[in-house]
Image: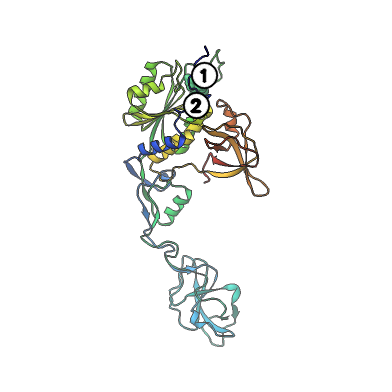
């Protein structure tokens, strides 16, 4: 009698596997932004998420000013033909306005950023006027102008960029350096942001040796250094959350249970790695079912098939696979968007764009595959991507050499050189 085989991670078509898109929808339906907020100084708000719209308290620019060095004039002084002579009343500097009322036949020398004096509406650049000596007995220096500058040219109107009261940054925006500068330009020194998310994480596995206690020591037979906790640390650090590192947890039901309780008591989100498959030393999904609820467990993706998500008390729990590459892929696809959503971000989907594949990629239909790639722009301006060598789920080097994931849809049966593929860069652009 042949052996009756059970479903496993070697199968591409396994009916029990949940499609990635559905898993993401279920996740989005269960995750909402934190309700607590705090007020922070502008600099401290970098990488945090706005909890209210910010509207401008001022017009930008706040006064009508010159965009060039030149002469502020009245356009009704422009001659129909030939030249006109204007008396220059003085100079308006940026930061030192000239308090005059410019009458017909008069002009003011003005520098870039200088406030337009009353009566003027146009700046003629200094290269387009001619200085002439003062007429006999005249009080002011004089310039000759022609009528070729269009009225209104070279003037920045008050409120032209932003009107006072206008919303400039929307609630749910992750604040970047550009936002910090924008807030400062409006004179806004404090903003309301969502509070920091607390994330607890631990590794499971009796084979793991922690770097903290074993650095430089030789590994015994069957032992390996715990890398997942450090990868998680680094990925979480980038998201600006408060980190709670709970170390390495032994492969026993009791230790796993204790780690779950510890973590969920302190954190908004709990992340484990390893022990989530169906082996005899895997306690994660059973513990999640015992202490909380499991929303999904096995997904139609590679790497990353065993990925448990559920809740323990109020904490969201992600049981990531043990394989180091699978940890990163499942983090970027599932954990990162969820964390961003909880942090209050409205824009959580990873950035994706298309590139021409320089590699042939083998694949059978059934699961979404995430291969590690290097995306770059060739001399012809075309964006191309190459796979980074062998793609085993345990090979962290394939990840370290990569700058993107190549996302190959479930139904795809392989990629030929020259095909268009979807890539997802690891980091944001700014
Ligand atoms: P598991 O799902 O626990 O069976 O782990 C799958 C594979 O990932 C095994 O080869 C583990 O040794 C490896 N692994 C699990 N956790 C870690 C970790 N924290 N760091 C490095 N490798 C790990
Ligand atoms: Mg394990």
Does residue 335 sit above or below 107 in this rendering?
Answer: above
Q: Nearer the viewer, mark 1 or mark 2?
A: 2
**How far from the left and from the top, in percent, is residue 210?**
49, 21
Mark 2: few/some/many CA within 10 Å (<14, 14-19, 20+): many
Marks 1 and 2, the one that precedes in the sequence: 1
Q: Is residue 402 left or right of residue 269?
A: right
**Residue pointed to by mark 1:** 214
**Residue pointed to by mark 2:** 228
Mark 1: few/some/many CA within 10 Å (<14, 14-19, 20+): few
Measured in 3D between alpha carbons, the distance from the residue under mark 1 to the one under mark 2, in whole angstroms, is 15 Å
Task: Please give the count of numbered marks on the rendered protein.
Answer: 2
Residue farthest to the right? 379
Front one among 230 and 42? 230
Q: Residue at x 40, y 38 (%)?
A: 25
Does residue 187 sit above or below 28 in this rendering?
Answer: below
The residue at label 2 has a CB less than 8 Å from ligand 1: yes
């Amino acid at each position: 009698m042949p052996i009756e085989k059970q479903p496993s991670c070697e199968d591409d078509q396994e009916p029990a596997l949940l499609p990635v898109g559905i898993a993401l929808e279920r996740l989005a339906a269960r995750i909402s932004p934190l309700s607590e907020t705090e007020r922070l100084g502008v600099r401290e708000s970098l990488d945090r998420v706005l909890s209210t719209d910010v509207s401008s308290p001022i017009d930008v620019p706040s006064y009508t000013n010159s965009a060039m060095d030149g002469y502020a004039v009245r356009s009704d002084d422009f001659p129909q033909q030939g030249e006109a002579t204007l008396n220059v009343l003085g100079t308006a500097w940026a930061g030192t306005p000239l308090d005059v009322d410019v009458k017909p036949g008069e002009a003011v020398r003005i520098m870039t950023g200088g406030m337009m004096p009353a009566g003027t509406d146009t700046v003629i650049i200094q290269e387009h006027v001619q200085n002439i000596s003062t007429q006999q007995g005249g009080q002011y220096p004089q310039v000759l102008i022609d009528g070729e500058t269009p009225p209104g040219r070279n003037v920045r109107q008050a409120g032209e960029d932003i009107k006072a009261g206008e919303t400039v940054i929307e609630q749910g925006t992750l604040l970047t350096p550009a936002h910090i500068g924008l807030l400062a330009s409006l004179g806004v020194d404090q903003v309301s942001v969502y509070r920091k998310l607390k994330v607890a994480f631990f590794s499971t596995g009796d084979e793991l040796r922690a770097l903290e206690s074993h650095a430089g020591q030789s590994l015994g037979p069957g032992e390996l250094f715990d890398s997942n906790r450090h990868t998680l640390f680094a990925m979480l650090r980038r998201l600006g959350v408060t980190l709670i590192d709970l170390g390495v947890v032994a492969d026993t039901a009791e230790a796993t249970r204790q780690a779950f309780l510890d973590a969920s008591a302190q954190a908004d989100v709990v992340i484990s790695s390893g022990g989530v498959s169906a082996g005899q030393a895997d306690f994660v999904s059973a513990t999640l079912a015992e202490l909380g609820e499991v929303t999904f467990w096995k997904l139609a993706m590679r790497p990353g098939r065993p990925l448990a998500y559920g809740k323990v008390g109020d904490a969201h729990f992600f049981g990531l696979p043990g394989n180091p590459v699978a940890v990163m892929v499942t983090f970027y696809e599932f954990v990162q968007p969820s964390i961003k959503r909880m942090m209050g971000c409205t824009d959580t989907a990873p950035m994706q764009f298309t590139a021409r594949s320089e590699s042939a990629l083998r694949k059978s239909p059934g699961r979404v595959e995430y291969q590690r790639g290097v995306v770059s722009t060739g001399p012809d301006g075309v964006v191309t991507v190459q796979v980074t060598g062998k793609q085993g789920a345990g090979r962290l080097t394939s990840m370290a050499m990569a700058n993107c994931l190549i996302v190959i849809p479930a139904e795809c049966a392989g990629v030929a050189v020259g095909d268009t593929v979807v890539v997802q860069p690891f980091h944001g652009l700014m």
